[in-house]
Amino acid sequence: MTPVVQLEALEKRFSAGRMEVHALRGIDLAIAQGEFVAIMGPSGSGKTTLMEIVGCLSRPSAGTYRFAGRDVSGIDADGLSRLRGEQIGFVFQSFNLLPRLTALENVELPLVYRGISRRERRERAGETLERVGLAERASHRPAQLSGGERQRVAIARALINRPHVILADEPTGNLDTTTGGEIMTLLDELHAEGHTLVIVTHDPLIGDRAPRHLRIRDGRIESDERAA
């Protein structure tokens, strides 16, 4: 089976004045459909840069990246935007919900950009909110929701386009321990349903929830372990 994510000899360099910073150095990585992978490492290790490249938010300086079998290096900016919107779901630490929109409207927003009819948008957004346990909060705005509820809305928004992969950057970072555990339980359930999940976290207790642990240090993969 073709991996959803396949990186070969991937590098990312940044210019800092006269210096060149190597954020990623020769990354080889394949993530199969249905895997749940945690990317862990200390601050500055390159894990966020790796997540940005996997999410097509940044381009590598060298190497190859194939998403669902497609080499993304030749895709222009508009094409990458479409790929992100239709095939990748994002969950951020800060939720990134629009405060003036209701939970339902926030969830259906990706479908608005795709030109999906209002009737279908509402139906799919309602079903997805129900999936994350928030059907009764559909008409509430973010300020009226708890942190855990806002993250559930963000997860529903990530699911709405039925993406190939869901990327979560510190998904429990702004939550207390109990609420963070509830969000991880939801992600466990999504994995059990067959969704491909990649999370970035600095918390080993969160990372250990994933069956596969990828540890990054100094821009290189230090270890790649699967639970027994």
Image (spheres, rainbow, N blue to C red):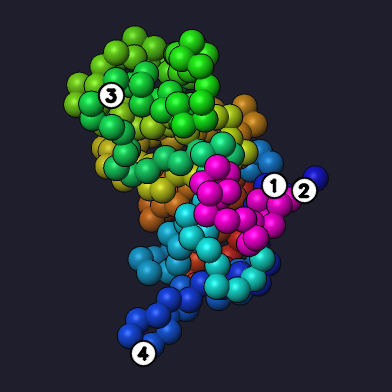
Q: Which mark is residue 152?
A: none
Circle 1 sits on which residue? 68
Q: Position of residue 27 (x, y in %)?
A: 60, 69
Circle 2 sits on which residue? 2
- Disc 4 marks a residue whose amino acid type is Arg
- Nearest to N terminus: mark 4 or mark 2: 2
Q: Nearer the viewer, residue 221 or 78?
A: 78
Eye-nearest disc, 1 or 2:
1
Q: Nearer the viewer, residue 79 or 184?
A: 79
Which element type, helix, strand or loop, lies under badge 3?
A: loop
Q: Residue furthest left?
A: 143
Residues at marks 4 and 3 touching, judged by CB atoms closer than 8 Å = no
Which element type, helix, strand or loop, lies under badge 1?
A: loop
- Nearest to N terminus: mark 3 or mark 1: 1
- Disc 3 marks a residue whose amino acid type is Leu
Label 1 Cα neighbours within 10 Å, binned few <14 / some 14-19 / many ≥20? some
Residues at marks 1 and 2 touching, judged by CB atoms closer than 8 Å = yes
- Disc 2 marks a residue whose amino acid type is Thr
- Nearest to N terminus: mark 1 or mark 2: 2
Q: Which mark is residue 18?
A: 4
Give the CA distance from mark 2 to mark 3.
Answer: 38 Å
